[in-house]
Image (cartoon, grey):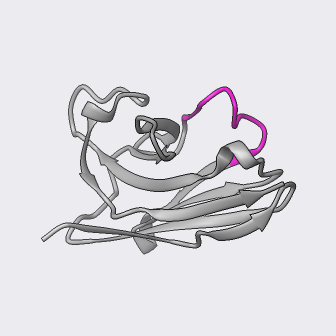
Amino acid sequence: QVQLVESGGGSVQAGGSLRLSCATSGLSIRSYAMGWFRQAPGKEREFVAAINWNGASTYYQASVTARFTISRDDAKNTVYLQMNSLKPEDTAVYYCASGIPLGWSARSTSSYNYWGQGTQVTVSS
């Protein structure tokens, strides 16, 4: 059974930092792209960041570029999202997901087949 478990969320003030982790079991993330998405209350789930199968390419939503960094540790089956200079508009539930083996498109939710349960990030002004 494949499981993705996010951790590291919490409440911070604007300008603060958090590091999210996504630990997987039942799935070796090696050779799979991984992504982070978020969903704020009343809004649709949106793409945040993604990393390709070997870590050579990363992708970001324009609003988080230069503030967020996605990385992966295949030996630990874990993906990370370092979030710096957080803003109130970053408040959301953050989800990690594993990419489909073929035809993956970084920003599309339909390109991910396994999802975690999410972790709450709250940024106060």
Quadrant location of residue 12? bottom right
Q: Quadrant of the N terminus?
A: bottom left
Residue drawn at x 45%, y 40% as measured from the top left: 42
The residue under the point 48% across, 35% down is: 47
Residue pictured at 33% horizontal, 58% vertical? 29
Q: How many marks?
A: 0
Q: Is residue 109 left or right of residue 27?
A: right
Q: Nearer the viewer, residue 60 or 117?
A: 117
Of the 4 image quadrants, the one containing the C terminus is bottom right
| Residue 122 occupies quadrant | bottom right
Q: Is residue 58 magenta?
A: yes
What residue is rendered at 59% in x and 69% in y? 9
Residue 2 in the image: state x and y as whole percent: 19, 67
Residue 70 coordinates in the image, percent (x, y)? 60, 50
Q: Which residues are magenta?
A: 57-68
Q: Give the main secondary structure, helix, strand or loop, of the magenta stretch.
A: loop
Q: Could you say where residue 65 lies in the image, as x and y percent from the top left? A: 71, 34
In this view, the residue in front, 29 or 109, is: 109
Q: Is 63 placed above or below 88 here? A: above
**36 lies above or below 60:** below
Q: Quadrant of residue 17?
A: bottom right
The relative height of residue 3 versus residue 61 in the rendered view (above or below) is: below
